[in-house]
Image (spheres, helix red, strand yellow):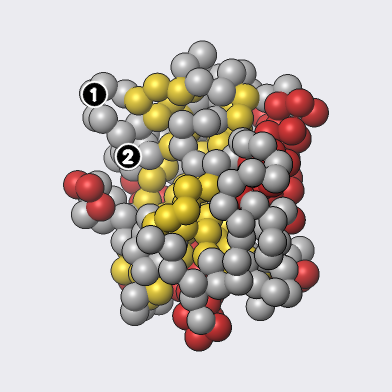
């Protein structure tokens, strides 16, 4: 069921989103060559709890960690690992969900570890731009297909990257995953019409190679690119309002000025 949020509920989700945003801002300084993905997990969990939130991924369908930490060809859902240390030139995706007094927020970000190659930097730049292209389509009266069509045209048609289809955005609040499903591909003018009060995630996952992925049989969670190419992801929670889409997980208020409540 799709729930339409009141202004008060949206503001509460923005307070939850501020915790995630603050965590990501600190991770920019923390993530360097030689750090383990377990150290990122420990930092993320402590940051969330120290700011009054609950790391909502812990216990979700048996998941045990506050964050998913996916490196290079890992697309999503990888476990934090004590023995996995990041190297110069890697990219790492950190995703988490915060519950603050019943208000949920969800955000993933891709980080360069030290200096990355121009090819990988372009992948990151295109993926982040794809996120904002999707956000721009999240207007009252538009349809979900408008978001996905715009993202896919930019990622695949203009840039030749693989736009992952198996994992998509979603509604959020009053639980982590709600209706509607928000694909990052689709047909403009088709799909559910967007209404004020809807809160959704937009979270494109973009591969240097093809869009196909597979899940590791060993842990049943880690998603990798099928062809071994590297992958990037960026995610925000947004509210659909009569004044346009509003980002509830903004890390950069100057950059996101037109999208703030």
Closer to the camera in the image, 121 or 240: 240
Q: Residue at x 60, y 71 (%)?
A: 196
How far from the left and from the top, in percent, is residue 25?
58, 62
**Element assignment for label 2:** loop
Q: Report how far apart the C-alphas of labels 1 and 2 lie in the structure.
A: 12 Å
> From the image, which quarter does the C terminus lie in?
bottom right
Q: Residue at point 34% right, 75% down? A: 102
Q: Secondary structure at mark 1?
A: loop
Q: Is residue 11 above or below residue 71?
A: below
Q: Residue at x 68, y 65 (%)?
A: 140
Q: Nearer the viewer, residue 227 or 80?
A: 227
Name the residue rendered at 61%, 57% in the picture. 193
Which mark, by number, is residue 250?
A: none
Q: Position of residue 165 (x, y in %)?
A: 52, 31
**Residue 218 has which mark?**
1
| Percent of width and height locating residue 241 | 65, 72
> In the rendered view, does 141 fall on the left or right side of 210?
right
The quarter holding residue 247 reads bottom right
- The 10 Å Cα crowd at callout 2, few under 14, some 14 to 19, many 20 or more, is many
Picture quadrant of residue 141: bottom right
Residue 34 shows up from this direction = no
Nearer the observer, 189 or 84: 189
Q: Earlier in the sequence, mark 1 or mark 2?
A: 2
Residue that label 2 marks: 79
Which quadrant is the N terminus positioned in? Answer: bottom left
Q: Is residue 238 visible?
A: yes
């Amino acid at each position: 069921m799709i729930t339409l949020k009141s202004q008060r509920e949206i503001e509460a989700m923005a307070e939850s989103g501020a915790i995630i945003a603050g965590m990501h801002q600190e991770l920019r300084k923390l993530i360097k060559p030689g750090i383990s993905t377990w150290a990122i997990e420990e930092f993320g969990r402590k940051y969330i709890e120290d700011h009054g939130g609950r790391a909502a991924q812990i216990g979700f369908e048996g998941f045990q960690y506050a964050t998913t930490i996916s490196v290079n060809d890992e697309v999503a859902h990888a476990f934090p690992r004590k023995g996995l240390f990041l190297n110069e030139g890697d990219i790492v995706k950190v995703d988490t969900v915060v519950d603050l007094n019943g208000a949920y927020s969800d955000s993933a970000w891709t980080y360069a570890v030290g200096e990355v190659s121009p090819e990988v930097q372009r992948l990151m730049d295109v993926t982040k731009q794809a996120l904002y292209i999707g956000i721009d389509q999240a207007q009252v009266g538009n349809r979900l297909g408008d978001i996905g069509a715009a993202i896919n045209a930019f990622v695949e048609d203009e840039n030749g990257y693989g736009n992952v289809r198996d994992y998509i955005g979603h509604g959020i609040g009053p639980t982590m995953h709600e209706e509607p499903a928000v694909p990052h591909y689709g047909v403009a003018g088709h799909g559910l019409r967007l209404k004020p009060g809807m809160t959704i995630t937009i979270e494109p996952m973009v591969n240097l190679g093809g869009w196909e992925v597979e899940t590791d049989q060993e842990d049943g969670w880690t998603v990798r690119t099928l062809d071994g190419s590297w992958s990037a992801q960026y995610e925000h929670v947004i509210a659909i309002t009569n004044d346009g889409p509003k980002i509830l997980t903004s890390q950069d208020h100057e950059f996101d000025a037109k999208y703030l409540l």
